[in-house]
Each structure stands twice: as structure tokens, then as C-alpha cells.
Amino acid sequence: MNHDEVKLADCDMRPAMVDDVPAIIAMLETGRELLAADGIDQWQNGTGPGVQSVTKDLMQGWGRVFCVRGQVAATAALIPGPDPNYDVIEDGVWDRTGNTSGAYATIHRVAVSPAFRGNHIGRRFYQRLIEEARARGFAEIRVDTHEDNVRMRHVIEGCGFAYAGRIFIDGDRTQPRRAYQLFL
């Protein structure tokens, strides 16, 4: 598929369903492989998302899929409420001026199907996730990615997220992540 073939009218986002699990797992696995091929240690050695996190996302209502002409093209989790991994931030600070309530949502576990890479699906998906978070009344979205994950950084920054500092997943100081925020 090329850039001209995927039009915004062909795209839709919806909650993930049980029938989507095989496609979601496949996308997460190919995402892990792409990161490994790029020499990025994110999602490697059993640290990446798998069946357990996908199941939790479904059960909690957090899982989202982005579809092109009815085919699942991307997956993510849109999670309401605070993320304990964001409690400590270094080399920066969370800007609180645009969010007096402190309530925010996070976007995690983003992956795009290899069949749709190169079609700006990641950016379009993020835009839909932002629209949903806004409609649900969140004042802010936070997200993080590996320092070397240039593809995801390009998408995040291209959607207007501002760099806030570094966070550490589960306190693992060997795996710093670039943290971003967007006020809605």
C-alpha cells in the first residue's frame, strides 16, 4: 500500500475486541522485531507487551485499534488515570500550567502492521486517540518512548507533544524513556 491509497475517509478507530487479539499480538511482535533490527533494546528480552497486557487492555476497555477499510492497521492502549512510571521525572519537569486538575491519560503499546507502514498510520492513529481523550474530558495526554526510537519520536513530536524529561519504567534506570505531554 502506498501513501496515496490510504485516505482519511478509509480510516476508523474503535475499541479492540477479542477477535482482534491475534492481529494485535502479531503487530506487537513485528514492532518488537523492528526495534531489535534498529538496535533498540525497547520491548526486548521479555520486557515488551504480550498476551497478558493485551488481555488486560481489553478487560479494562483500554485497547484501541485503528482500521483501514475494516482491516486492523495499528494498535494502542489509551489508559485513563495516572501512570506510576510518570511519578518521577528527571532532566525536566511535567508542565502543570495547562492541567490544573492533574488528570491525564496515557498512550502505550503502540504498533503498526507492517502492511500499513509508510502510510502515516501512526500519526493518524495518534490524532484519533487525542480526539477521544479530549472528548472524554482529559486535559492532558502523556506518552513515552525509547531515546533511540526515532520513528515513534517523529510521530509523537509531529502530533504536538512537548518533551518533558526522562522517566524510568518500573524504576529500571538502565532503560530511560523520553517522556512527552500534550495539553488538550
Image: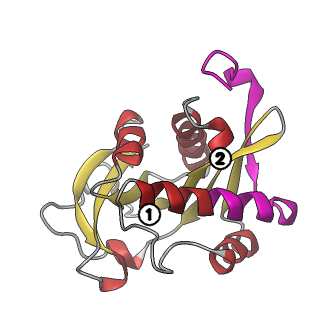
* Percent position of residue 161, x then y: 35, 43
Identify whether 14 is placed above or below 3. Answer: below
Residue furthest toward the top? Answer: 4
* Percent position of residue 2, x then y: 63, 22
* Percent position of residue 103, x then y: 44, 63
Q: Residue at x 54, y 40 (%)?
A: 122
Q: Is residue 9 left or right of residue 154?
A: right
Tell me where the magenta segment starts and ends, as one range.
1-28
User: Between tags 1 and 2, which lies in front?
Assistant: 2
Secondary structure beneath disc 1? loop
Q: Which residue is mark 2?
A: 113
- Residue 99 counted in the magenta span: no
Q: Is residue 100 left or right of residue 8?
A: left
What is the C-alpha distance between the residues marked 1 and 2? Answer: 31 Å
* Percent position of residue 27, x then y: 65, 56
Q: Which residue is mark 1?
A: 103
Residue furthest toward the bottom? Answer: 171
Quadrant of the image containing the C terminus: top left
Identify whether 1 is placed above or below 166. Answer: above
- Quarter residue 1 falls in: top right
Residue type (three-letter) at the residue carrying disc 1: Ala
- Residue 8 counted in the magenta span: yes
